[in-house]
């Protein structure tokens, strides 16, 4: 099947051809006809499946087909909500590319930058708005944007918005829209609160499920290195001496951890930059641009910041810290081995992360091969700390009362001070 078989208009086909899109991915093949038919959609798909085009292409076509809308009176007709700035900007870039031969306008509304330019873009008019919930809610409250004319709503990466605490903001935003609209809902996982939202928001949706989260691509070579926590940085620097690692996306658990890894790699002359929530928008875009162009060899990221990183020729993903949610592991390693290329996923496992590794292997249904021949083998044979194990209620013994050798037996105890008629004898 080609895009020509999906009833896409010539202007959009021309744009897709210019962007070297030839054959639709499975989610595009199933979702585009359903969205063009006006159906609500529930897409269960992990990163790298091509879901942006799956919703963006039919939205552009549906809005372009509407006639008689003067350019000076543009109203927001489609809203795409997404959890991170990087993902919002990436979607915006894609929509600009897909709609380059149409008259549509789109704009991205994200935090971390001045809102003045965004206010101007909204004042000039935008048919499609791609936004992160926090900044969008601010502009709604300031009366800079009106959502009363939204016809198509997209909730992208809904599970990540839940993880980031945006769900309440999302619900407030949805309350500002017409009840009658087309809703497209995408989530890699379906926790209970997300399942409830699906029932509340979608009407008789078409369900498209691509690449179950428990599966990992066969073309991704996975391995695990057992290593003590204090030797992880040394092991990472050692592995990166291998010049065949052309580009590596390294995942850490915390923002401070990402900065520490970058600092240590820079000391041994390995080009690296960090991308996380404490970085300014310009710094994050600069780091991502340098990584994509090859100026920076290693990008160190937290899971939240990594949403929106889309690089076709990423050779390696390295889990400096294993995630405590097994599905996150699948999303992480799915960033390599794209576009038909092979990929390599390397994980470091310290003692405290052994339960995480077991959960991951249970989810993917396979044992990740261990690499034993390396200079930093695990020496710590202590059991995992309590932080990585189910906590048990602590049973503490009552503390013995302390007595001072200088205590004056004639003094009344403090508990006797406030009895009726009694005063401290001090």
Image (spheres, helix red, strand yellow):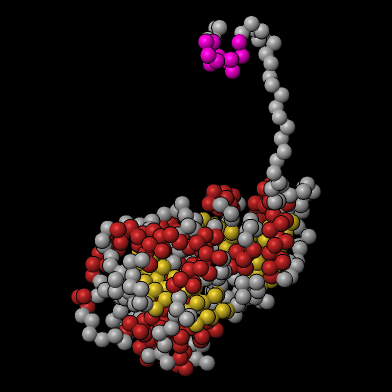
Front residue of 303/176: it is: 176
Q: Position of residue 228 (x, y in %)?
A: 72, 50
> In the rendered image of this protein, does residue 27 appear above or below residue 394?
below
Q: Position of residue 224 (x, y in %)?
A: 72, 62
Q: Find the residue positioned furthest to the front.
A: 420
Question: Image quarter for residue 69?
Answer: bottom left
Q: Is residue 339 visible?
A: no
Q: Is residue 418 visible?
A: yes
Identify the residue at image location x=42%, y=87%.
Answer: 37
User: Is 272 within the magenta?
Assistant: no
Q: Is residue 109 left or right of residue 370?
A: left
Identify the residue at image location x=56%, y=52%.
Answer: 254
Front residue of 303/30: it is: 30
Q: Is residue 316 left or right of residue 159?
A: right
Front residue of 177/138: it is: 177
Q: Position of residue 113 (x, y in %)?
A: 35, 57
Identify the residue at image location x=57%, y=79%.
Answer: 210
Identify the residue at image location x=30%, y=61%.
Answer: 140
Q: Position of residue 249 (x, y in %)?
A: 57, 63
- First to last magenta residue range: 412-422
Q: Is residue 288 left or right of residue 363?
A: left
> In the rendered image of this protein, does residue 52 appear above or below residue 414?
below
Magenta stretch, main secondary structure, is loop
Question: Image quarter for residue 126?
Answer: bottom left
User: Is 418 within the magenta?
Assistant: yes
* Total marks placed: 0
> In the rendered image of this protein, does residue 217 appear above or below residue 250?
below
> In the rendered image of this protein, does residue 319 appear above or below residue 127?
above
The C terminus lies in which quarter of the figure? top right
């Amino acid at each position: 099947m080609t895009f020509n078989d999906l009833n896409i208009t010539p202007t959009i086909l021309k744009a897709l051809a210019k962007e070297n899109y030839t054959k639709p991915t499975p989610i595009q093949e199933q979702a585009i006809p359903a969205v063009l038919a006006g159906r609500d959609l529930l897409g269960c798909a992990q990163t790298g499946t091509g879901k942006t085009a799956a919703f963006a292409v039919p939205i552009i076509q549906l809005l372009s087909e509407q006639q008689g809308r003067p350019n000076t009176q543009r109203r927001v007709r489609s809203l795409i909500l997404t959890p991170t700035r990087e993902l919002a900007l990436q979607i915006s870039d894609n929509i600009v590319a897909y709609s380059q031969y149409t008259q549509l306008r789109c704009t991205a509304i994200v935090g971390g930058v001045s809102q003045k330019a965004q206010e101007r873009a909204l004042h000039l008019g935008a048919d499609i708005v791609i936004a992160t919930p926090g900044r969008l809610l601010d502009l709604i409250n300031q009366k800079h944007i009106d959502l009363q004319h939204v016809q198509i709503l997209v909730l992208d990466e809904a599970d990540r918005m839940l993880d980031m605490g945006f769900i309440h903001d999302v619900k407030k935003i949805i309350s500002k829209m017409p009840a009658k609209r087309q809703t497209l809902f995408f989530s890699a996982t379906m926790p209970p609160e997300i399942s409830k939202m699906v029932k509340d928001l979608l009407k008789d949706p078409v369900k498209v499920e691509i690449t179950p989260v428990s599966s990992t691509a066969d073309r991704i070579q996975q391995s695990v290195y057992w290593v003590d926590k204090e030797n992880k940085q040394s092991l990472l620097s050692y592995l990166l001496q291998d010049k065949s690692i052309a580009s590596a996306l390294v995942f850490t658990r915390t923002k401070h951890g990402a900065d520490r890894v970058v600092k240590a790699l820079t000391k041994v002359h390995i080009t690296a930059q960090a991308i996380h929530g404490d970085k300014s928008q310009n710094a994050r875009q600069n780091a991502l641009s340098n990584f994509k162009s090859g100026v920076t060899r290693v990008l160190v990221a937290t899971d939240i910041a990594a949403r929106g990183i889309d690089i076709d020729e990423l050779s390696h993903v390295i889990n400096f810290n294993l995630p405590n949610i097994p599905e996150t592991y699948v999303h992480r390693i799915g960033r390599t081995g794209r576009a038909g290329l092979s990929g390599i996923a390397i994980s470091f496992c310290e003692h405290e992360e052994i339960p995480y590794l077991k959960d991951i292997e249970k989810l993917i249904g396979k044992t990740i091969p261990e690499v034993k021949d390396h200079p930093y083998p695990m020496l710590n044979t202590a059991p995992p700390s309590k932080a990585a194990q189910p906590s048990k209620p602590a049973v503490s013994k009552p503390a013995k009362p302390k007595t001072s050798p200088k205590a004056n037996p004639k003094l009344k105890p403090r508990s006797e001070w406030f009895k009726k008629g009694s005063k401290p004898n001090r």
